[in-house]
Image: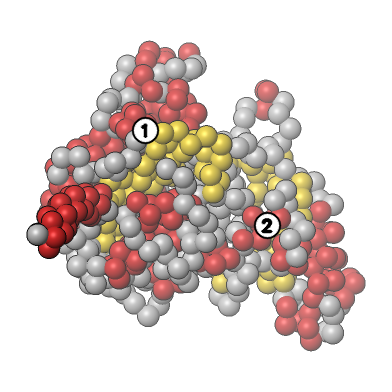
Amino acid sequence: MKILTDLRLLFLTVSAIIPALLHGAEAGKRPPLVTVITVEGLSGEYLRLLEPLFGPGGFPRLADNGVNVDRLDYGPGLDAAAASAMLFTGAAPMVNGIPSAKIYDTTTKLPRSPLHDPSTIGNFTDETFSPKALKVSTLADELRIDTDGHGRAYAVAPYSHEALAGAGHAGNGAYWINDMTANWASSAYYKEMPLAIKNRNYSNSLASRLDTMRWTPLLNLSLYPGLTMDEFITPFKNTYPRKDMQRVRRFLTSPKANTEVTDVAIDLVNELQLGRSGHTDLLTVSYTVPSDGSRAEIIDSYVRLDRDLARLLAALDKASGPGQTTVLLAGLPTVNGSSPDDKKWNIPSGLYSVKRAVSLLSIQLMAVHGNGDWILGYHDRNFFLNRQLIKDRGLSLQDFRSEVADFLGRMAGISNVVTIDDIIASRAGENPAALKRNTSLSHAGDVIIEVSPGWQIVDDGSGKASGVQRHTAVDIPAFFIAPGLRQKNVPGTVDARALVTTLSRILNLRAPNGASVPSISL
């Protein structure tokens, strides 16, 4: 009798435990498809201002149905390329090895992509890129490892650096637009070239369509807040004629490029049946919104992006199944520059000539230390010194750097100068630790300048003046939506490195191996 009673108790206990275990397994179940969306130049101020112009399926859906991060902190000095690498690795440039879209090659004395890889070849491009320069694993890598390759990872972006960071070392494919030919391109490092990409290039090429494209206001300009009378009288109109040698690059910074990226991303979801493999698939999609240009163009870019975002989210809903859409959307910093203000406003400004600075500095160094090519080159505020010559002359490299910094710091238009030694010793910048981790020592120059607000850099080898320097802080937001996530606002500033850690936690996935910042409390 006692045995029967014990068996009944055991049966009742097991009956109570099994549903709880099943519920726990369901709660920990990964989504069939996760999508990471990045937007270069995204501003929280513009999202708040333009909310009445957005449809329900785009930005408002993300804001109303998930976790809202008010302000991301990527640290100082990063462009979208470095920020993309940080986002997908959870590591800063000192660890992940990607400090910017271009680095200076001291051998060729020319700038190049840090992702340049002469050991591979391109698909639909003569560019030779691969993710090998990424020194750590990415979200895509960890997903592929965890699923033993059954979960797939693809990246679609206007630029190569965003696509390569999104697909990582182990991804199935990374696709971007070549800025000269307008072909959808990839690297032979990745093994897959879907029909969606091939067909675009062969039968519906972007190059053949650019001539007919027009970027004009999507809505009545009376709906766009804060426009000047001139913008009402003469609405903007952007075209991309074949005779314009820069037409592809101009296209890539326009909302038309976002629409092209969205079309290709949706084509890939449909062709590859993403979200239906029985394992979690990953798709990364990159967009851009301008920080420069007329106010009407900036507003129109946001309105159009909202529509493209709604289309993409609807396609993800269809692929993932009802209630299964899992998305991280994060803004990326953009190049901090703008067009100069009209001289009639008397805003302090000037031109900092790199050519003149190098010439004067060379004369000074030869006067003190004798003849020689003391300066190897300049790139993106970095002066590169001839370290071998300095060593051969028996001079202290640190003292030489300090001497150069002192000379450059006395020039008009320079607000600050630091040496790489200052950065390594964490004694440079308003946040020395952040500046140090955002510096890749193998790519940095010896002396780094900061140009005063309002000034432009000229004669830097690019053939054009830089944008006017602005030190204005921008609120860069992020959004998470996933099954089981409740609407929540995360106030204050969040370290951008925490995003991939947080997403990994949502996916019950090991975080990338360089991700050291804890996840956000959800």
Answer yes or no: is residue 433 visible: yes
Q: Which mark is residue 260?
A: none
**Does dot 1 land on a helix, a strand or a loop?**
loop
Nearest the eye: 427 or 81: 427
| Snapshot quadrant of residue 132 | bottom left
Q: Quadrant of the N terminus?
A: bottom left
Quadrant assignment, res 218: top left
Indicate which disc, 1 or 2, sits on the residue closer to the N terminus. Answer: 2
Horizontal and vertical percent position of residue 5: 13, 56
Q: Residue at x 37, y 80 (%)?
A: 119
Relative to 374, say whether 302 is above or below: above
Is residue 45 shown left or right of residue 146?
Answer: right
Residue 403's x, y, as percent? 85, 65
Q: Who's the residue at 42% across and 51% down the image? A: 502
For the C terminus, give its image quadrant: top left
- Label 2, on which residue? 433
Q: Which residue is mark 1?
A: 487
Q: Are marks 1 and 2 in contact (CB under 8 Å)?
A: no
